[in-house]
Image (spheres, rainbow, N blue to C red):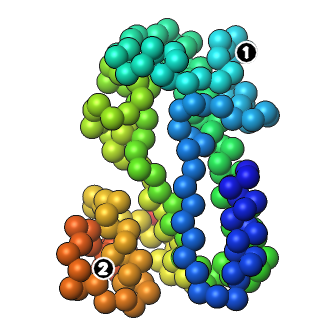
Amino acid sequence: ERVGRHAAEWIENNKDKDFFLFLHTYQVHTPYDTPSPYGGMFLDPDAVWTRAHTTEIFDGKKSIFKEMSDAQRRNMVGLYDAGIRYTDEMLLKPLVTRLKELGLYDDTMIIFTSDHGEEFFDHGSWDHGLQVYDEILRVPLVIKFPKSQFHGRGVESIVRSVDVMPTVLEQLGIESGRLELDGRSLLPLLSGPSRDR
């Protein structure tokens, strides 16, 4: 919420300039400690934890292979989901609303993504960093292009986080051919045959 307020102020102060704004949050990262009423939205009535820090629960990284009960697992997932809901409603939604109020939304490129997912004992461990299953690797990548170009389009092939920068550069008309980039622009994939969703 605080990040959202400061970002909205920054946008207000820079609305007459071309700008690039990068926002990063650990809200959906351990410790799972989301303010009320969000923190309890997805918890069972008998949930043990109203906040959780995996390093405290698991006694550091050495214990992340510890099996817990179904109730404890649901408890942890509920706290994680609360962080997602809180971030949606207290950071993303207000920023999009403010961009619209300022008349900037239509011309703005917005990218929403994550560096990794979390494992909730899906494959025998908790947290992230030790395994490379889908729950760790498959993260959201949502891009709202200026003028809502490609609205509703999806890409079925595998894309990577390193593809974000070349996509932004091409969208802005910035030549990147001489750069040694690991990624590739997603614009050709979006401009190809329709894969509307």
Q: Amino acid at mark 2?
A: Pro
Mark 1 element type: loop
Q: Is residue 193 visible?
A: no
Q: In this figure, which residue is indicated by the disc labeled 2?
A: 188
Q: Which mark is residue 37?
A: none
Left or right: 188 as drawn, with respect to 150: left
Q: Nearer the viewer, residue 44 or 64?
A: 64
Q: Vertical placement of 150 versus 156: above or below? A: below
Q: Residue at x 22, y 67 (%)?
A: 182
Tell me the quarter of the picture where residue 136 sits: top left
Q: Vertical placement of 41 versus 182: above or below? A: above
Left or right: 47 as drawn, with respect to 189: right
Tell me the quarter of the picture where residue 86 sits: top right
Q: Residue at x 24, y 72 (%)?
A: 181
Tell me the quarter of the picture where residue 119 sits: top left
Left or right: 149 as drawn, with respect to 5: left
Q: Mark 1 to mark 2: distance in Å?
A: 49 Å
Q: Is residue 58 visible?
A: yes
Q: Residue at x 52, y 18 (%)?
A: 56
Q: Nearer the viewer, residue 129 or 194?
A: 129
Q: Nearer the viewer, residue 196 or 119?
A: 119
Q: Residue at x 56, y 12 (%)?
A: 71
Mark 2 element type: helix
The image shows residue 72 at horizontal and vertical percentages of: 55, 14
Mark closer to the chain start, 1 or 2: 1
The image shows residue 188 at horizontal and vertical percentages of: 30, 79
The image shows residue 43 at horizontal and vertical percentages of: 67, 23
Q: Which mark is residue 45?
A: 1
Q: Does the CB distance between marks 1 and 2 fall below 8 Å?
A: no
